[in-house]
Each structure stands twice: as structure tokens, then as C-alpha cells.
């Protein structure tokens, strides 16, 4: 059984794009004053946990913003119509959080900002959902994912956080897997519980990281 599609406009996708553009305009007007309040820096995780998600809505430059928002414009509407607004938003935020947690675990002295982790989550989700409903894999999607994971290693000064990409990709794929296995109406409670479980797992990884440091 395929996901139930919707003809509604992708309000969440367009809203995320609007917020990201608005935040970037603030960054241009106020400079580091706003950027430093939103960027994710792992040592501030416990004292300022909101940075785990606020960093997803800020960007380091116009090309950074345009690339991420174009990717969201391509994948977002398809997934939002397929999943529904609430499920799509939950996936986006969890993937963004997953990207930040991966940075905390794998690059704890770096600072990151941008929607790349969440975008990679959508890419991973798209791949998993396609496979879950019997569709064929999209070679172009796999190439895009592969290139973005390889670039930081072949171009060391690219300022691309492969850690955030991997974290977002894994969490996005996991959330999509949950969705594909809990599509029936009677499984709604199970689906919600599984999503809460993913969030709890990410929080547990954060706490474990600081407990062991």
C-alpha cells in the first residue's frame, strides 16, 4: 500500500524556505550579532541546547542558502504531499537535530550552521520511501549524496560538515523507515511512539557524550 498523497500546497516546505531567507536577511543586516546566536557550537550544547536546531535555519553565505533551499524546493513538496505536513515537519526537524548530534559526537570542536543535515535527511528519506513502496532507486539522488559526502575529504577547505550530512542522512532514513512500517491508521500510536523514541535516543546520545567527557 502506498502512502496517501495530498493535493494541498506544501505549506511547511515553503514556510521553512521563508524562515531561512528571513534569517539570512537578518544575518546580512545584523552580521555576527544574529549568526553567533544561532550557530551550533558543541561546547554550548547543555547551556544553550536550542542551537542544535536554530543552526539549521541560518547559513554561511548566499550560495550556501541557495543550494540548500533549492534542494528543499525539489524534495520537500514531494515528501510533504506524500507524508502530510506534521510527519514531514517531524522528519525535517529530527534530521536537522541528527545532523547536529553527529557534529557533537564526531567533530566536537567545530561550529556549524545550515540546513544541510536536514536536507540530507530528506534525501535519505526519499530513497527509503521509494524502496519501501516498491519504487526504483534514483541514480541521480545517489550521486548527489555520494558527491556531498566525498567532497569534504577531497577538498579539505570546503567548509562542508560531512558529520552533519551523515547524521541527517541516517536519522532521515530511520524516520522514513518508521513511516513505511506504520502506514496503517491503527498504527498511529506506534508511529508517534517510535518518533518519540528517535528523539529520546538523540537526547541520550547528547547526554552520554557529556557524561563520558
Image (cartoon, rainbow, N blue to C red):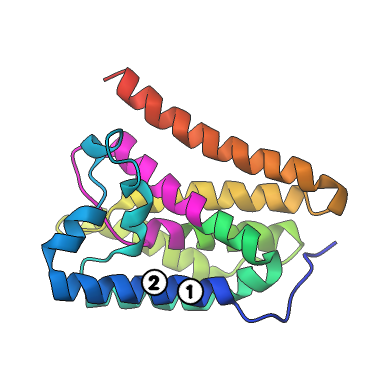
Q: Residue at x 76, y 40 (%)?
A: 190
Q: Residue at x 61, y 49 (%)?
A: 175
Query: To which residue does mark 2 refer?
Result: 19
Residue 163 appears in view: no
Residue 160 in picture, x, y percent from top left: 25, 58
Q: Is residue 140 visible?
A: yes
- Span of residues in magenta: 93-119
Distance from the alpha carbon under mark 2 to that under mark 1: 6 Å
Q: Which residue is mark 1?
A: 15
Answer whether residue 42 is magenta in the image: no
- Residue drawn at x 14%, y 61% as measured from the top left: 33
Quadrant for the N terminus, please. bottom right
Q: Please tell me which residue is depicted at 50% across the width and 49% down the height of the picture.
A: 94
Residue 71 quadrant: bottom left
> Predominant secondary structure in magenta?
helix
- Percent x, y for residue 49? 34, 41
Q: Is residue 147 above or below residue 156?
A: below
The reply to whether the C-beta atoms of the residues labelled 2 and 1 are less than 8 Å apart is yes
> How many discs appear?
2
Amino acid at each position: 500500500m502506498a502512502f496517501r498523497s495530498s493535493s494541498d500546497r506544501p505549506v511547511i516546505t515553503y514556510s521553512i524556505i521563508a524562515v531561512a531567507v528571513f534569517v539570512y536577511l537578518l544575518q546580512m543586516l545584523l552580521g555576527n550579532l544574529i549568526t553567533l546566536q544561532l550557530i551550533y557550537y558543541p561546547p554550548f550544547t547543555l547551556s544553550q541546547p536550542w542551537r542544535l536546531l536554530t543552526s539549521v535555519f541560518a547559513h554561511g553565505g548566499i550560495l550556501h542558502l541557495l543550494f540548500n533551499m533549492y534542494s528543499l524546493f525539489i524534495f520537500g513538496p514531494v515528501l510533504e504531499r506524500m507524508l502530510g505536513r506534521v510527519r514531514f515537519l517531524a522528519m525535517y526537524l529530527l534530521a536537522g537535530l541528527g545532523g547536529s548530534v553527529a557534529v557533537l559526537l564526531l567533530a566536537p570542536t567545530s561550529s556549524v550552521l545550515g540546513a544541510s543535515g536536514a536536507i540530507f535527511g530528506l534525501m535519505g528519506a526519499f530513497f527509503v520511501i521509494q524502496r519501501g513502496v516498491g519504487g526504483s532507486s534514483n541514480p541521480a539522488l545517489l550521486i548527489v549524496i555520494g558527491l556531498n559526502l566525498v567532497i569534504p575529504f577531497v577538498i579539505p577547505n570546503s567548509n562542508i560538515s560531512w558529520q552533519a550530512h551523515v547524521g541527517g542522512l541516517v536519522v532521515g532514513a530511520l524516520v522514513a523507515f518508521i513511516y513505511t512500517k506504520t502506514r496503517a491508521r491503527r498504527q498511529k500510536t506506534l508511529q508517534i511512539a517510535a518518533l518519540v523514541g528517535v528523539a529520546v535516543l538523540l537526547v541520550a546520545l547528547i547526554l552520554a557524550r557529556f557524561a563520558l567527557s
